[in-house]
Amino acid sequence: GVISLFNLHFVKTGIVNKEYGKLLAEAKNIREESDYGDFAIVSREDAKIQIEHAERFIKEVENAIGE
């Protein structure tokens, strides 16, 4: 529900670029797979990429809140 509301109120209104809605959904999918998947393995490189995406996401949201 949070991702849908984020997209509705921030992405669709143009406050946040749609790229960040996609990054949020991707992070959720990876987290769910690693938490609930039987044989999910997240590599160090995949984790590093997700951290970089999270940092970009946070900066984008901070900029949006500041406006």
Image (tube, rainbow, N blue to C red):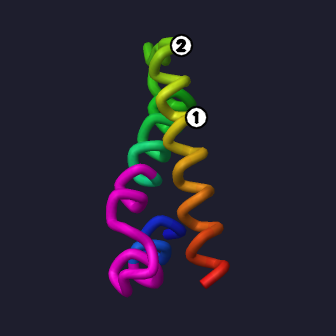
Image-quadrant location for residue 51: top right
Q: Secondary structure at mark 2?
A: helix
* Quadrant of the snapshot with the C terminus: bottom right
Which residues are drawn in magenta?
Answer: 8-23
* Left or right position of 39 against 48: left
Q: Position of residue 66 (x, y in %)?
A: 66, 79
Place of residue 26 in the rendered image (x, y in percent of width and height, measured from the top left): 39, 45
Identify the amino acid type marked 1: Ile
Percent x, y of residue 62 = 65, 67
Query: What's the residue at 47%, 65% (across, down)?
Result: 3
- Residue 55 in the magenta stretch? The answer is no
Q: CA distance from mark 2 to mark 1?
A: 11 Å
**Which residue carries the number 2 mark?**
44
Q: Is residue 6 above or below residue 52?
A: below
Residue 10 highlighted magenta (yes or no): yes
Q: Is residue 35 above or below residue 11?
A: above
Which of 31/55 is in front? 55
Please count the marks in the image: 2
Which residue appears at 33% of the width and 81% of the height?
12
Give the prevailing secondary structure in the magenta stretch.
helix
- Please say if the residues under marks 2 and 1 sit with CB atoms less than 8 Å apart: no
Residue 51 is marked as 1
Give the class, few, some or many, for how many residues have Cα within 10 Å of label 2's Cα (few <14, many ≥20): few
